[in-house]
Structures are given as C-alpha cells and as structure tokens.
Image (cartoon, rainbow, N blue to C red):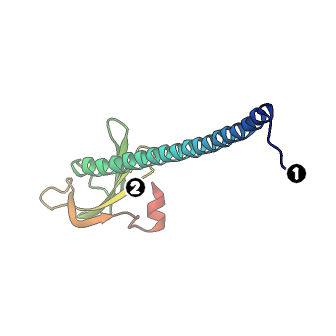
Amino acid sequence: MWRPLSSFERFTQQGNTTLLCVLMVMTLASSLLRLKSSSIHYGTQQVNDEKKYLTAFYQAQSALAWGGSYEWSMHLGWQCRASPSSSFSVCLWRATPTEGWLRGSSEKSEWLLWQRVIFPKTSPSRSQRHRRGWIDDCPLSVEQCLER
C-alpha cells in the first residue's frame, strides 16, 4: 500500500543518487584523461621519430653535396672521407677512371643515399653529378656494398 514519505526519509534517499552520479562522472573523466595522455605520448613519439628520420636524411644529403666538391684520388675502389663536424661521411666507389658512385651516410649510418658521378677528362679528380644518378639502394654488387 502506498504511503507518503516522511521528510526524514526523503532527505536520506535523495543523496544516494547524487553520490552515484558524481562517482560515474569522475570515473568517466579519469578514463578520458588516461586516453588523452596515451594519445599525447604516442603523438610525441611520432614527432621524435620523424625528427630523427629527417635529420638523418638531410645529413646524408649534405654528405653527397660535400663529397661532390671534394677532390678524389685516381685509384679505383672505395675511398671515404668524414666531415669536419663528424655528423656525416661520404664514400666514393670509383668503378672506372671516368665513373663512380658517391655514398652519403648520416652520422649513425641510418640513411645511405647514392649518387652516380662522372669524372671529366679535363679534371679527373673532381666529380660531377650524373643528371639521373639519384638512387636509394646500393647499385653495386652485394660484395662491393658490404666492403665498406
């Protein structure tokens, strides 16, 4: 049978629902904060990886540019030079007296870039970039690539 609640009963029953709602909101907010924190951590990690990638790539490009202006010996085979700042190195594989391959590498050899070069007869110690000489993979045989 239905009866009206006394003022004391009404007062004690109203607080339980409010407390439950506050706990649910706090739990939901805590979960959202954890998700946001892991998302920020993942994003930061991606930015750092991209920065390392770009730094290594540009170091390898700098090595090729520096190696292109360097005077190389006439002997065939591998010749290597380190940059004055030691942030990159460049090697030349001189296949013939008039052709060769420059290999630019970043500081920790994370990136290797290759550039085909020619040596004109007028200045056989100075390399010139071949017009279509860019390549990402080692163009030499496996044994030659692993030599240096």
Residue 17, x across and y down, in percent:
72, 41
Q: Quadrant of residue 128?
A: bottom left
Q: Secondary structure at mark 1?
A: loop
On residue 1, the disc is: 1
Residue 16, x across and y down, in percent:
75, 38
In the image, what residue type sits under mark 2?
Leu
In the image, what residue type sits under mark 1?
Met
- Seen in the picture, residue 34 relative to 112 is either above or below; the reply is above
Q: Which numbered disc flags the more N-terminal residue, 2 or 1?
A: 1
Identify the residue shown where x is 47% and y is 49%: 46
Residue 72, x across and y down, in percent:
26, 50
Q: CA distance from mark 2 to mark 1?
A: 87 Å
Q: Is residue 135 visible?
A: yes
Q: Say how many tags the image has.
A: 2
109 sits left or right of 114 in the view: right
Q: Nearer the viewer, residue 32 or 94?
A: 32
Q: Which residue position is annotated with label 2?
A: 112
Q: Quadrant of residue 51?
A: top left
Q: Nearer the viewer, residue 98 or 83?
A: 83
Q: Residue furthest left?
A: 122
Q: Residue furthest right?
A: 1
- Seen in the picture, residue 54 relative to 11 is either above or below; the reply is below
Q: Secondary structure at mark 2?
A: strand
38 sits left or right of 113 in the view: right
**What is the crowding at mark 2: few (fewer than 14 residues within 10 Å), some, or many (at least 20)?**
many
